[in-house]
Amino acid sequence: MIEFIPVLLVIFTGFSGIMINRNIVMKLISLDIMNTGMVCFFVLISKMSGSFPPIIHSLDEMNLDFVDPIPQAVIVTAIVIGFSTLSLSIALTAMVIERTKKVKVDDIEKKVGT
């Protein structure tokens, strides 16, 4: 249970950065920090199911406690999706900053008129 505390701290740090920061770039960085914390959290959860890699070399190893490979595959997919989402968000944010010449969310909303 003690290994969950740093991971939950990383998730909370990212979430509080999203809520507190008014700078749109800092919000993206906080979102990426929170995404990293969530990936670490799911890796910890999937690690709890077993302790050996799911590769059987002989029949003597059939009784070992294997790690479930499905959550690990899902995590790899989540990392790729998180990276592509972050890249798209950075590109869109760069376009918004270039057009409005503002980086604070409140100033961008005033400039756009929403």
Image (spheres, grey):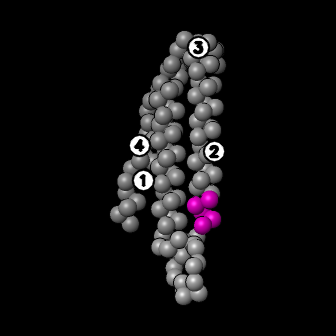
Q: Give above or below for 43 relative to 59.
A: above
Horizontal arrangement in the rendering, residue 66 relative to residue 12 (left or right): right
On the image, numbered disc 3 is attached to which residue? 98
* Disc 4 target residue: 13
**Distance from label 4 to label 1 (Cα)?**
8 Å
Name the mark nearer the viewer: 2 or 4.
2
Q: CA distance from mark 1 to mark 2?
A: 21 Å
Give the residues drawn in magenta, as a range: 69-73
The reply to whether residue 101 is visible in this rendering is yes
Q: Position of residue 79 (x, y in %)?
A: 58, 48
> Per the image, is 101 magenta?
no
SS at badge 3: helix
As rendered, which of 104 and 68 lies closer to the eye? 68
Distance in Å between CA atoms under marks 2 and 4: 21 Å
**Looking at the image, is mark 1 or mark 2 earlier in the sequence?**
1
Q: Nearer the viewer, residue 12 or 77?
A: 77
- Vertical side of 52 occupied by 81: above or below: above
**Amino acid under label 3?**
Glu
Q: CA distance from mark 3 to mark 1?
A: 35 Å
- The residue identified by callout 1 is 8
Q: Position of residue 107 (x, y in %)?
A: 53, 16
Residue tagged 2? 81
Of circles 3 and 1, the one toward us is 3
**Element type where label 4 sits in the image:** helix
